[in-house]
Structure formats: structure tokens, C-alpha cells
Image (spheres, helix red, strand yellow):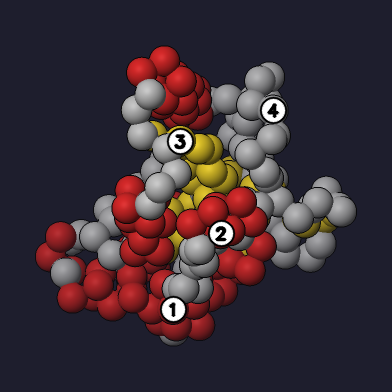
Amino acid sequence: MIEKEKRYVYDGVKGVTEEMSIDLTGHTPYGASKYVGDIYTQEYAHIYGMKTAVFRMSCIYGIRQFGFEDQGWVAHFVIANLFKRPINIFGNGKQVRDLLYAADLVEAYDKFFRGNIKHDVYTIGGGPDNTTSLLEFIGMIENYTGIRMKYKFDEWRPSDQKVYISDIDKVSKALNWQPKIGPVKGVELLTEWVKENRELFE
């Protein structure tokens, strides 16, 4: 990795592929639960011949998401900004994720379901074209709403990756699929939905 002013970047790597080892890579209990589901799904295909796909997802977000500090950080940041609530940033805020809007993910699910592929494993997310650091994302929200974000820094959380970007080449080719809604448009859609449903968050 290389550390820049507002983000970390991979050094010579496009993103995480399906071939990346998932053993001894630092798992939270939450991450371990996803790992178990991944293996179960593959075994149902191999043992019972079921049509299954594993989608190893990055940061999925969209309207109707009730974000909290521990889950759904994209919506959590938007909701906190609109209601002028403070948030905690664990680490220095330079950690990078790729963002995938939920409607784009559903399209990929549908393409697999309706297609002829019997079983596969896909790394899926917004890919290299849809990345943001936490600090950059805060700026994105502030630019759209005109409201300054209130935040403070805290200690890094265990096993928090400084960069996670999905290499989506395999899923893009297999399913003839690409993300359509980028982070700027996604923030706009999510923000307007929260505004229209303020009573759910007050």
C-alpha cells in the first residue's frame, strides 16, 4: 500500500480477486460468519449439484438502508450528516472501500439466476472506478448537503483493512454486468430518500 493525503492505495494491484486466500487474513466474528456462508454455498453446489453463486461483496448501500456505526456505514454517515449527529472515525479516515449501489447488485443476482452458469464464486463491488476513502466520502456528502459533518477520530478496529477494492473483471465478463450508479449519484439518491423519510430517523 501507499499512503496519500486522504487515502491509502494499492501498490501495483488492481483489486482483490477470487483467488485471494481467505485463510489467516484477519477475520472479525462478522467476517467469519460471511466466510462460513461462503463455504456452505460452495458445498451445496459441489455435493448436491445445486445452482448456487457466492457473491463476495464490498460495501453495498442504497435507499431503505438503516445504517449504524457497526453496519451500513455509508447510510450511517448520510443520516448523521442530515441530522447533525457526530460520528466516530476508527483510524485516520484514509481507509478505502469501493461502493456498490444495491440496485446494481440486484441486477447481477438476476443475471446469474436467469443465466446458464451452474455455480461460481464472484468478487463483486463497485470496483476500482467507484472507490472512496472515509475522508473523501465525508467531503462528498458535505458538498451535496451543504452541512458540515461532525466527527472525531478513535482507535483502529481489529482487522480493519486499510484498502479493500474489488477486482470485478470476472463477474463483469461472466454476467455481462457493470455498475451503473456511481458514488456521487448514489449519495444523492440516498440523501433524498432520508430527507423524504425523516420520521424514520428522528
Name which of mark 2 and mark 4 comes first in the sequence.
Answer: 4
Kindly tell me whether residue 100 is visible in this rendering. Answer: yes
Does label 2 or label 1 sit earlier along the sequence?
A: 2
The CA span between labels 1 and 4 is 33 Å
The answer to whether 23 appears left or right of 143 in the picture is: right
Q: Report the amino acid beneath label 1.
A: Lys
Q: Secondary structure at mark 3?
A: strand
Percent x, y of residue 154:
59, 43
Q: Residue at x 70, y 34 (%)?
A: 20
Location of residue 201 by image quarter: bottom left
Marks 3 and 4, how far apart at CA: 19 Å
Task: Kindly check if marks 3 and 4 are in contact, taking CB atoms under 8 A apart as contact.
Answer: no
Q: Residue at x 58, y 25 (%)?
A: 27
Q: CA distance from mark 3 to mark 1?
A: 32 Å
| Foreground of the two, 80 or 187 | 187
Measure the C-alpha gap from mark 3 to mark 2: 15 Å
Return the residue at label 2.
172
200 vs 126, left or right, is left
Give the residue type that dot 2 points to: Ser
Figure quadrant of the C terminus: bottom left
Q: Quadrant of residue 188?
A: bottom left
Q: Is residue 14 left or right of residue 78?
A: right
Q: Which residue is mark 1?
A: 185
Residue highlighted by disc 3 = 119
Residue identifier under label 4: 21
Q: Disc 3 marks which amino acid?
A: His
Dot placed on the residue nearer the N-terminal end, 3 or 2: 3
